[in-house]
Image (cartoon, rainbow, N blue to C red):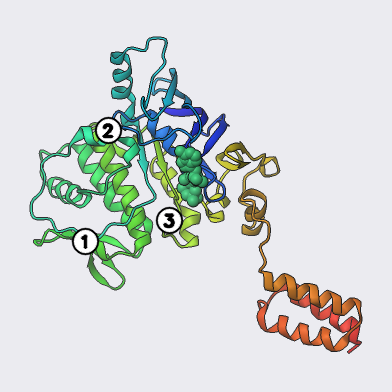
Amino acid sequence: MKIKSLVIQDVGGISSLKLENLNPHLNIICGENGIGKTNIIESISACFTIYSPNELKKKADSNSGLIELNMTDINEGFKKIEYIVDVFYPREFNDNNTNYRTLYKFWENYSKFLMYFKADRFFSYQRIDSLKIHDDIEQHTKNNLKGVSRNNLKDWFIRNELLSKQAYTEDVNKKNIGYAKEFITLLNSNYSFSSIKQDMEIYINSPTGEIPYEYLSSGFKSCLFIMWGIIREIQIRFPNIEAKNFNGVIIIDEIELHLHPEWQNKICNVLKRAFPNTQFIVTTHSPHVIQTAEHNQVIALEGINGILNKKDLESARNGFSGWSIEEILTDVMGMRDLRTEWYRLTLSKFNTALDEENVESAKAIFSELETRLHPQSTELTLFRFQLKALTGE
Ligand SMILES: Nc1ncnc2c1ncn2[C@@H]1O[C@H](COP(=O)(O)OP(=O)(O)OP(=O)(O)O)[C@@H](O)[C@H]1O
Ligand SMILES: [Mg+2]
C-alpha cells in the first residue's frame, strides 16, 4: 500500500493543503513550528484508524474538516478515501457505497498497513515479572492515530528471543528477531546484543561493558524503539511476513529526535535499506535529514493562516547531497538569517569604520571579530585584507 496524494481542508490549523505525487519510498515534511506538520501526518493516520473518537479536530471556526486521500493497495488497485472530520461525527467514508459494513471492511483490510510513531519515544526501565503470551492484535491495528505503543516492547523482545531457540518456532519469527538484534549493531558497530539473563533483562555489549538495554543513550533508544516497534507491529499484523518485506506506510514525527547530526544524516537511509518496500512519511526540523534526500522526497511547507503550499525546490532537482547545511537552512527551511544579531551589528560597525577611514575604530572592531569568529573563518581573512588596505600596514 502506498499513499499517492492528499488534500486537507480545515483540519487542525490547516485551512487548505494539496500534496500530489508522494514519493513511494520517502517523504520528508519540513516547515516552521506550528505550520501543520503533525496535523498532516495525523490526518493520514486518521484515515486508517477505526476507533478515534474526536482525536482529530476540525479547524476552529469552520463547519467541518475534510481529508481526501488517494492510495494504491498492495495489488496496485487505486482507492480513494474521503474522511469528514467533525466534532460530532468524527468520520465518514465515501466509496460510492457508504454503508457501515463497507467502511468497516476497508479499515479491517487497510488499517494494518499503516504505522504511526509519535514524537514521544522515550522509554525507561520496565521490570518484567511474567511474559505475556499474546499481544492484543486489535489494539495494534485499529488505533493508528494513538501511535505505536511502547508498552510491552521489552516483553515482546524477550519472549521472541527465548522462543527463537526452540525448534518449533516458525522461521519467519526467528528471522524477525534476528533483524531486531542486528539493528543494535547497525545503529552502532561498537554495540551488539549479548543475551537475556536469568533476571529477565536484555543485555547489550557496549564499549563500557555489558549493560541492560535501558541504559543505552536516548538517541540509541529512540532509534531502537522505532526499529523494534516496526518489527513487532509487522509480526503482530502479518504473522507470515518477514519484516523487511513489509509493503505499507510508516509515519514518523520528528525523525531526528535525540539524534546527533551524524545520525540525523543516516537515519532515513538506514530505514529505507531495512524496509525497502515501505513508504516512509516523516517530519523533521533537521537540515541533516534533508541533506541525504532526493529532490522529490522533500515537502517544504510554506504559507500563512493555514493556507499551505509545497515550496518549489526545482533548484535541487538532482537532490540535496551537494547542498551545504546553510543552503538547506535558508532555501528549503526558510531560515532568514544564519548569523547572530551580534555578528550583523559588529559587521555593520566595521563597514562604517572602513567607509569613514576610521583606523582606530576599524582596528578595535577587527580585534573583537578576531576573538569571536572561527579561527579558519574565510570572512576573517577578508576583514584582515580590508583592514590592511585601510592602514597600509
Ligand atoms: N482545531 C484547530 N483549529 C485551529 N487551529 C488549530 C487547531 N488545532 C491546532 N491548531 C493550530 O495548528 C498548529 C499546530 O500544528 P502542528 O502541531 O501540526 O504543527 P507542527 O508543524 O507539527 O509544529 P512543530 O514543529 O512545533 O511540531 C498550531 O499553530 C495550532 O495553533
Ligand atoms: Mg509537530
Which residue type does callout 2 highlight?
Answer: Thr
Instruction: Give the residue at x 80% y 81%.
Output: 384
Instruction: Give the residue at x 35% y 33%.
Output: 54
The quadrant in which residue 310 appears is top right
Q: Which mark is residue 341?
A: none
Alpha carbon separation for disc pair 2 and 3 = 25 Å
Taking the image as shown, residue 204 lies to the left or right of residue 300, namely left
Which residue was labeled with disc 3? 257
Taking the image as shown, residue 343 lies to the left or right of residue 164, namely right
Tag 1 and tag 2, C-beta contact below 8 Å? no
Above or below for 309 versus 163 = above
Instruction: Give the residue at x 35% y 62%.
Output: 218
Q: Which mark is residue 141?
A: 2
Of the image marks 3 and 1, the number of the one nearer the N terminus: 1
Which is more toward the observer, 327 or 171?
A: 327
Mark 3 residue's CB less than 8 Å from ligand 1? no
The x, y position of residue 367, in whole percent, is 74, 86
The x, y position of residue 338, in whole percent, is 66, 63
Of the image marks 1 and 2, the number of the one nearer the N terminus: 1
Which residue was labeled with disc 1? 125
Sort mark 2 into few (<14), some (14-19) or many (20+) by Cα contacts within 10 Å. many
Q: Secondary structure at mark 1?
A: loop
Alpha carbon separation for disc pair 1 and 2 = 26 Å
